[in-house]
Amino acid sequence: MRRYRPADIVDAVVIGSGAGGAPLLARLAAAGLSVVTLEAGRRWSPPEDFATDETEQNKLFWRDERLTTGGTPLAFGRNNSGIGVGGSTLHYTAYTPRAQPDDFHLHHDFGVGVDWPFGYAELAPYYDELEAFLGVSGPSSYPWGPPRPAYPLSPLPLNGAAQLMARGCDALGFRTSPAANAALSAPYYQPSIGWRPACTNRGFCQAGCSVGAKASMDVTYIPLALARGAEVRPECFVTGFERDASGAVTSVIYRRDGADERQRCRSVFLCAGAIETPRLLLTTGLGNASGQVGRNLMAHTGLQLWGSFDTAVRPYKGIPGALISEDHHRPADADFAGGYLLQSIGAMPVTYAGTVARGRGLWGEALTRHMRGYNHVAGINILGECLPSPVNFIELSDETDARGLPKPLAHFTAGENERRLTAHADKTMRAIWQAAGARDIWTFDRYAHIIGTCRMGDDPADSVVDRDGRAHDLPNLIICDNSVFPSALSVNPALTIMALSLRTADRFLARVAQGDI
Amino acid sequence: MTRTPDHRYPVGTVQALLDGEHVTAPTRAALQARLTDPPAAQPDMLGNRVGLLAAVCARLVPQSGSAPVDVAGMLHARLATGVGDGWRYADLPPDPLAWRRGLEGIGETAQAMFDGDFTGLTAGDQDAVLHAVQAGSPAGEIWRELPAARFFETLLAAVVETYYAHPLAQEDIGYAGMADAPGWQVIGLGEREAREPAGIVA
Ligand SMILES: Cc1cc2nc3c(=O)[nH]c(=O)nc-3n(C[C@H](O)[C@H](O)[C@H](O)COP(=O)(O)OP(=O)(O)OC[C@H]3O[C@@H](n4cnc5c(N)ncnc54)[C@H](O)[C@@H]3O)c2cc1C
Ligand code: SF4
């Protein structure tokens, strides 16, 4: 690996190595720029370090304490974000559907929320590129959205929950399809990366993939970036910036082994995720002329519905998210803006038990009896739209963490639109699970993915970054992660974050080519 | 009437899996340690309330086996590491203060409802105390400041997640996911692979 010295002025420092940071790191390095990524977490070696055990794998999650409040307080930790080279892709389920064109103009269609400054057409080539590079498994023809190329690999096999969802949807006339999963259904080769093996149906994507079949960033864009000359500097926690008289950032300050170090640079890409990114800007006071940093927090409506079946499911096996339906993307009978997709889900024992405890409040014999039926439970969930609201935001709390930095405090209260959408989805999913033969049906009302806390837009008064990701009031600070999304999109976010990451790099490189940087 | 599915594995099933060839080294290391090593001794984080916590755990996750899982000891050991879940309701104080206060509150409620120490109550009375805390407005001074239902949810989730992380609890629900090598080929509905043991009842 190439190593830079702190005194070297590198072309760019990238903060964070997840979905937003890793692809652009590789792109900038491939263009010949000198780039260093500073990552708070470790560099893991999955075959030796990853156990098929949830408690052991808690090390993949961001466990510095975050405070949560509001009418429907958000859960973080295992429900939210990761740490380590690869970021949250280390533990994502690898569901990689594309957003649909109308996801980008919710305001135009419904008069609520805001539109993206560009549309689907701008991201489509990046979606194509990503699916080919990551090796996404999926159907040869996808039933929803605009025409698109076939997925490079055939779909992964359907597990019990997926078969049950297919059964229920068939009975009700809803279309289903094998899902797009960024996990390999066959060995796959990419230059500079080599062969990655096929998924072994181990079912533990949310606890890290020990075989490297899942396209987390640590086995895809990070090795590519390293091969192109980038430096990845793990266990470096960024705490601040140095700036020159014009206000431009000149170096990034970080803590390693308890001591402060700095890396000089010409530009900074802040890709620390939708909580740490605004937190860092709020603690340093940067990029917030609009007062919008931390505002517009959205979280996908993510209602889960569970049931018990006479036939054994053994819900720990198979890619957790094997089946999808987007028939409710814009439901005809909706009394809300936007829509949702439906997915089958897996159940690892500890996470499932925790869900039963929080969601149903079961304990004692009622709990242990229910858990003895674990092998017969199966679940489905939605991922749905969420509108920005002035009452939902991230701020700094009065409490400090072990580093002396203020802990973030998230306010979240589901609004009327989220409640109506969730009620619609509850009815739909209940009908599907009844048709599939479920008993003892229950729901867990949950919100997933933190989105929108450094919104992208053309108007510096109500957004933090421009359409190229540049902070309106600090041009050599660029942001790229889930925080810049103007709207939530009714799909899982990672593929779109990666697409944005490649686009952000290309826009930056275009300015480099023009001599603007 | 359909029978409630019950998928318990015979005692010793998980140890046999761990001793076999179908478990990867990192998985074996994590589970074997949890199975054989008692929770590390810790300085008292709970102001002399580990016994009370153990009594609460015994009601939240009742165990019938001859060698019960030491859930309270595992929780206490985790509290001592200072690493939690990564989040907390803003209206609860930080761990381990929340735990100390909450356990003290359970003690107060036991006194108010049954005029005795929680640990000395009958199982039924203990359950009544815990139900009152879960319902959100139990008797006791502590609960004026500490939101009871929130505390109970946090406590319950921690107890349950600690218990079901233990190989013996996983045996009790017929979980075989730790047999992670070489992966699963037979994954469909109602399908069982040869190395997945059959349950006692189902
Ligand atoms: C259990 C679970 C399952 C999921 N499944 C899916 C799925 O199937 N499909 C999907 O699309 N999405 C999924 N997601 C969401 C997806 O993982 C995230 O949306 C995505 O990874 C976010 O990308 P990001 O770049 O915004 O942040 P991250 O990927 O979280 O990257 C941020 C990185 O910045 C680092 N960092 C933060 N602060 C600092 C600092 N101060 N200094 C240095 N480094 C720092 C972090 O350690 C981290 O590595 C899932 C999430 C969870 C919790
Ligand atoms: S299910 Fe497949 S992709 Fe997911 S963690 Fe297991 S082997 Fe990796």
Image (cartoon, rainbow, N blue to C red):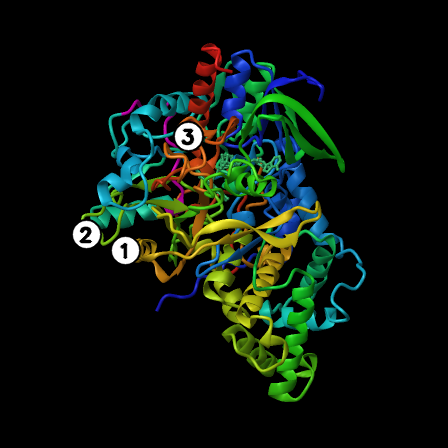
Q: Mark 2 points at which residue?
A: A333
Q: Is residue A14 above or below residue B26?
A: above
| Residue under the point 28% across and 53% down | A432
Protein chain holding label 2: A
Instruction: Write down the residue under mark 1.
Output: A424
Whether the residues at callouts 2 and 1 have beta carbons within 8 Å, the answer is: yes
User: For numbered disc 2, what is the local secondary structure?
Assistant: loop
The answer to which of A58 and A398 lies nearer the viewer is A398
Which residue is at the far front? Answer: A245
Q: What stretch is highlighted in magenta?
A: A148-161
Q: Where does residue A317 sit, x and y in percent of width and height? A: 47, 43
Disc 1 packing (10 Å; few <14; some 14–19; many ≥20): some
Please identify the quarter of the rendering in which residue B173 is found. bottom right
Q: Name the residue under label 3.
A: A466
Where residue A313 sits in the image (x, y, percent)?
A: 42, 50
Amino acid type of disc 3?
Answer: Asp
Name the residue located 44 percent from the left edge and 59 percent from the top edge: A72
Task: Give the label, 1 or 3, closer to the camera.
Answer: 3
Q: Is the magenta stretch mostly helix, strand or loop?
A: loop
To which chain does the residue with label 3 belong?
A
Whether residues under marks 1 and 3 lie with C-beta atoms below 8 angstroms apart, the answer is no
Q: Is residue A389 magenta?
A: no
Say above or below: A488 vs A15: below
Examine the rendering and report whether any part of residue A151 can be seen: no
